Image (tube, helix red, strand yellow):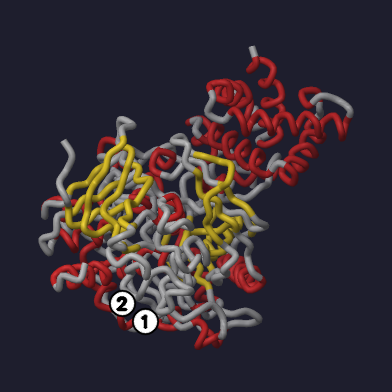
């Protein structure tokens, strides 16, 4: 299956965009690589992603003489930087897609302090009041 | 069974097309409005969900070319851009219409602020606008609703701006601060850009189109107009051809055609309508259809604070504005001006507006969400003939029609101006007490100017009343006709121009001139 081929590369790139740390597994916490591979092969983003992944693999070989999926986080960062310069459309789309998957997870929203939809509960009557001093749960000071 | 001949076919059911439809229907004209997108029921279709925007924005392919390649966001659906817009509606200043005379850049419009004043007032009343005109107003004016209270986010921003001697104010915004015109006051849920589920935000459907339909206008959704039909012998247009929701070809015969499909699709439609009598596109004897395309150079600037800001509580944009740098006397090393507008949004859009950082920096930025405030630094982009919309020679849409290709390069003044705007925003955030200031996305906002208005038919596409120079019963009523873009949000001015044009169309029709 083609998505089985693309998933490791997408997982590595997604992890480079939102990395794991003590708070969570980053993009991996929402299975971003697998979900993007599925979306890619469902046809919605296939041509842009296919070309972008081809470029990313090429940069990995050019820069580190190893396939993308085997690169260390600092090496993935270099590949992403190269993609930003040379394949900006793919870079922007990938970054936006990874962020959207990550930030659509209610657990992530809770960690960043975003309560989610509020219309059904009447919005925010305290919108114009001081917002206290309690930091968002996942925030580093 | 097809329709009979109608008086007016309006292409585009956004704010401008809706103004024209309502104003002509109210004068007894038979009007059909066609839109390529769907019709939404806000209460059913627009829950708080960032995914809504992808249904209401133009997602068919477009090609961005040139060194400043940009693809401005445009709406799609009955209501057009007003479904996803954020509602900030300041008036242009008188000097915005005379940039060449006053500063030697851009070009003068063939109309001025005084021509639009009654139409500004009319649109503000009908649409429903809350706010104040600010200390640096184009002229003192009253709005139909009191200003919104500033959210905490805006209060922090205003504190910094005021500390620098600037004049932050609560700008005109088309979101109800009190119940108005049968719609409720805003509950500050913070999801304006995903479509307003409460109905507090003015959009073209709830205001003008509802009235127009009551007055007999028909709105056809999922109708992609791909050709304006031209009768070369009579030098007139006779209607439009469109693909309907079932993919079937349809035709509407009309005495008058009004294009209001925005500054990308309007010139595309004119170019797609090329025929033997107009081989370079309809209304394009000047060769200026698609040229002088403009956008607003802008920069998102974020400031992070120790204490929570919770900028998601409140309207996404426009709780506060700073317009001090619109004034010529304050300018240093560049022409024209800029504004700063408060702009915080829901998390996915916040991430998008952050620019291009990845890795640890990006993740820290995401986790600073509730502690972050933001100014949108929004500047005037000067017109340049080389910035243009053409038909792409290779890429086609799902119907096999060439898509719009937008070729763009920012000018030196644009770069200097938006850099000054960005730096002013950073200075304000420092003064507000931000512990960290980050520059986010720089991009082109709004689309304008691809069928510019003018007196000279050799260098413009429409006359001062939006009638095309070439075809007397073909009008363009959207931001395409802008001669310059000013430094503020364009929709109110486009609607005022459309209102003025509608009055003229009605008067001409009465006199039998159309």
* Disc sitting over residue B194 in the figure: none
Q: Which of B81 and B239 is in front in this view?
A: B239
Q: Nearer the viewer, residue B341 or A41?
A: A41
* B54 with respect to B428 (left or right): left
Above or below, A62 against B334 in this view is above
Chain letter, disc 1 residue: B
Chain letter, disc 2 residue: B
Question: Label 2 near label 1: C-beta < 8 Å?
Answer: yes
Which residue is drawn at the image coordinates 77% and 42% (left, top)? A82
Above or below, A67 against B80 in this view is above
Image quadrant in which you'd find residue B379: bottom right
Residue tagged 2: B116
User: What x and y, as percent, mark residue B245?
Assistant: 30, 34
Which residue is drawn at the image coordinates 46% and 65% (left, top)? B449
Query: Quarter of the image containing the N terminus of chain B?
Result: top left
Residue tagged 1: B112
């Amino acid at each position: 299956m083609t998505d089985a081929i693309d998933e490791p590369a997408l997982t590595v790139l997604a992890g480079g965009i939102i990395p794991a740390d003590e708070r969570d597994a980053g993009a991996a916490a929402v299975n971003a690589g697998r979900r993007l591979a599925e979306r890619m092969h469902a046809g919605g983003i296939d041509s842009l992603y296919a070309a972008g992944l081809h470029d990313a693999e090429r940069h990995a070989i050019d820069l580190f003489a190893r396939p993308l999926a085997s690169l260390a986080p600092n090496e993935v960062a270099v590949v992403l930087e190269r993609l930003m310069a040379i394949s900006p459309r793919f870079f922007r789309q990938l970054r936006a897609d990874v962020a959207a998957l990550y930030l659509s997870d209610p657990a992530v929203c809770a960690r960043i302090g975003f309560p989610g939809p509020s219309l059904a509960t009447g919005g925010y009557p305290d919108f114009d009041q001081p917002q206290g001093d309690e930091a968002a749960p996942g925030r580093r000071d | 069974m097809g329709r009979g001949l109608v008086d007016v076919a309006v292409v585009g059911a956004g704010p401008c097309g809706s103004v024209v439809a309502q104003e002509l229907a109210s004068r007894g004209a038979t009007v059909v409005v066609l839109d390529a997108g769907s019709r939404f029921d806000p209460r059913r279709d627009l829950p708080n969900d960032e995914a809504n925007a992808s249904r209401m924005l133009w997602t068919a392919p477009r090609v961005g070319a040139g060194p400043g390649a940009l693809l401005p966001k445009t709406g799609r659906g009955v209501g057009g851009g007003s479904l996803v817009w954020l509602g900030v509606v300041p008036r242009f200043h008188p000097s915005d219409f005379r940039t060449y005379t006053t500063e030697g850049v851009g070009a003068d419009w063939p109309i001025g602020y005084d021509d639009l004043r009654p139409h500004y007032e009319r649109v503000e009343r009908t649409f429903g606008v809350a706010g104040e005109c600010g200390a640096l107003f184009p002229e003192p004016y009253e709005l139909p609703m009191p200003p919104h209270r500033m959210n905490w986010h805006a209060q922090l921003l205003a504190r910094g701006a005021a500390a620098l001697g600037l004049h932050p104010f609560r700008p005109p915004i088309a979101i109800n601060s009190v119940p108005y015109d049968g719609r409720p006051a805003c509950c500050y849920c913070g999801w304006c850009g995903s479509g307003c589920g409460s109905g507090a935000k003015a959009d073209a459907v709830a205001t003008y189109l509802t009235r127009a339909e009551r007055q007999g206008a028909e709105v056809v959704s999922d109708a992609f107009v791909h050709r304006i039909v031209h009768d070369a012998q009579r030098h007139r247009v006779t209607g439009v051809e469109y693909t309907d929701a079932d993919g079937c070809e349809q035709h509407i015969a009309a005495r008058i055609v009004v294009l209001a499909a925005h500054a990308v699709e309007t010139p595309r439609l004119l170019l797609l309508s090329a025929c033997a009598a107009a081989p370079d596109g309809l209304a394009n004897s000047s060769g200026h259809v698609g040229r002088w395309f403009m956008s607003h150079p802008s920069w998102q600037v974020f400031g992070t604070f120790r204490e929570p800001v919770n900028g998601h509580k409140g309207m996404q944009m426009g709780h506060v504005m700073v317009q001090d740098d619109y004034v010529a006397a304050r300018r240093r090393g560049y022409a024209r001006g800029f504004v700063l507008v408060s702009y915080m949004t829901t998390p996915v859009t916040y991430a998008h507006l952050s620019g291009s950082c990845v890795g640890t920096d990006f993740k820290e930025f995401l986790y600073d969400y509730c502690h972050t405030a933001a100014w949108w630094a929004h500047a005037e982009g000067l017109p340049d003939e080389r910035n243009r919309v053409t038909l792409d020679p290779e890429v086609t849409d799902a119907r096999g029609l060439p898509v719009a290709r937008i070729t763009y390069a920012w000018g030196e003044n644009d770069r200097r101006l938006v850099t000054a705007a960005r730096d002013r925003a950073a200075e304000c955030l420092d003064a507000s007490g931000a512990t960290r200031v980050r520059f986010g996305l720089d991009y082109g906002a709004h689309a304008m100017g691809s069928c510019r208005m003018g007196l000279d038919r050799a260098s413009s596409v429409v006359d001062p009343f939006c009638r095309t120079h070439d075809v007397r019963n073909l009008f363009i009523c959207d931001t395409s006709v802008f001669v310059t873009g000013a430094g503020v949000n364009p929709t109110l001015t486009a609607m005022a121009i459309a209102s003025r044009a509608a009055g003229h169309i009605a008067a001409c029709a009465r006199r039998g001139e159309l």
